Image: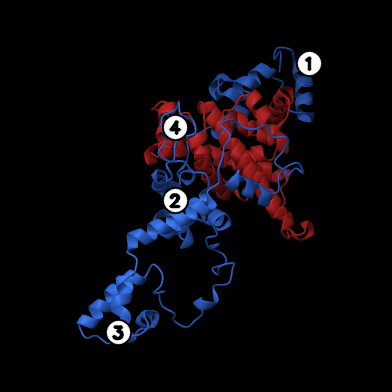
Chain colours: A red, B blue
Amino acid sequence: MPILGYVSGDDFTTVLSAAQSGSEDAFAALWRAANPVLLRYLRVIAPDAAEDIAAETWIQVMRGLAAFRGNESDWRAWLFTVARRRAIDETRRRSRRPTTALDDVAVTQLPSAPDTAELAMQNLGTERAITLVAALPPLQAEVIMLRVVGGLDTETVARLLGRSSGAIRVAAHRGLRRLAGIIAEAGVTL
Amino acid sequence: MTDPGVPHDDMLSSIWRARTDVPDVGDDVLDALLTGDLTPAETTAALRPVAEVVAALRSAPGANELTGLDETLALFRAARSVAVDRAPRFGYAPARSHRAPRPWRLRSLKIAGAVAVAVLGGGVAAAYAGALPAGLQKFAHRSIGAPAGQPNPRPHKPPHPSAASLPVGPNPAGPAAHGLCTAYAHASAHGSGTQRAVAFKNLVAAAGGPGNVTAYCGTAPRPGAGAGARAKAGVGIGAAPGHKPHGKPVTHPSGGPAPSPSHTPPGKQKGKAATG
């Protein structure tokens, strides 16, 4: 199985260089490798606008592509940096719009522990896994997605989030333990 | 569950797990899960569920995660074409001479988009036609002023006063002149009455009377020259010098995904992206 999010087959440097020279095929290869990864990350940090933000991310990446320098890890870190900024912008934009008051939201629409437990008891597809992670505290959820799905190391995530490496490590570990707790409470046996 | 052979310890462990996060595994094991060095099959029974979640996060892409490539490539193509078109005209040289020359470079998609709409088909024109998926369409709307697309089919800005309900026809003083002249000559030669059409009325009026149309059309710009001139004008006005995207991720001061006051507001950021 190809490793999610990495340019398989061709050497990344070759593919990147071709894309920077205007090769559509090369750009498509970069997109195919990274778009699913970006979407999964965005569905955790900006679930209502993940597709929009991913599209915007790619347009911004096109703009900066020629000037990009770095290896595949740098490339991924850059993609996530762009995506994250776009997500923050989008969150801010939406927060300025009038939204439904919490009282008006039906109780069934609110996230709740029983829903999460029910979710955990089903077979764990990617969708359910993402939803489970999204139920974690925001920092833990984001760190887990960047580490697991993004394939970024602790130091890169720390730079991206503006936190210490220690804080990132702790958040990742706590997140995984809490995730285990959520599944255990649901009584799931896999 | 450190020692399953000792019932007392096992019971304590169960109580602990019930009250806090479980299971009680070492950080090094969790690190191995994060990096993918530990698969669900290699974990203990207690850790297997969370290992399954991690594996699912990393699973192969689904079809729904690979839609939108065509639209993205259309934009890529349109932007590249514009950049290639303008590079030789301005004697463009790569900023880093020790690198291989790059035939294209995008400094501002906004400029590229505007020019592409004037001279090209492709994705940017599709954005204007409202043909892109919601995400791209929305971005195109914000960045190059294309229509917003659904859910509001009407453009944000009211149309020009001249674009009212009455037919106006192409402007004979503009890029359409050559086409109008060709059609007019054809209609005249075949004795057609289509000269009365709005477009031809405009042409006759611009020429100063039916007798002057031939002379007027002799001065009409050919399509190639007109498009080039527009492209040049578009690039010249809006080209943003010194756009340097970051090759490395920039440290971000904010922690979670929530907005942080230290960030540049979207409006500013957009301007910055387009010009700096």
Q: Nearer the viewer, mark 1 or mark 4?
A: 4
Question: Mark 1 belongs to which subunit?
Answer: B
Amino acid carrying label 4: it is: Leu
- Helix or strand or loop: what does disc 3 sit on? helix
Residue position marked by numbered label 3 in the rendering: B211
- Helix or strand or loop: what does disc 2 sit on? helix
Can residue A30 be seen here?
yes
Q: Is residue A80 above or below residue B131?
A: above
Question: Mark 3 belongs to which subunit?
Answer: B
Residue position marked by numbered label 4 in the rendering: A16
Residue position marked by numbered label 2 in the rendering: B71
- Helix or strand or loop: what does disc 1 sit on? helix
Q: Nearer the viewer, residue A55 or B271?
A: B271
Lower sequence index among marks 2 and 3? 2
Amino acid carrying label 3: it is: Gly
Q: Is residue B265 above or below residue B252?
A: below
Amino acid carrying label 1: it is: His
How packed mark 3 is, by other alpha carbons closer than 10 Å (few <14, some 14-19, many 20 or more), is: few
Question: How far separated are the C-alphas under marks 1 and 3?
Answer: 110 Å
Question: How far separated are the C-alphas under marks 2 and 3?
Answer: 49 Å
Question: How far separated are the C-alphas under marks 4 and 2?
Answer: 20 Å
Question: Mark 4 belongs to which subunit?
Answer: A
Q: Residue at x 51, y 33 (%)?
A: B59
Q: Nearer the viewer, mark 1 or mark 3?
A: 3
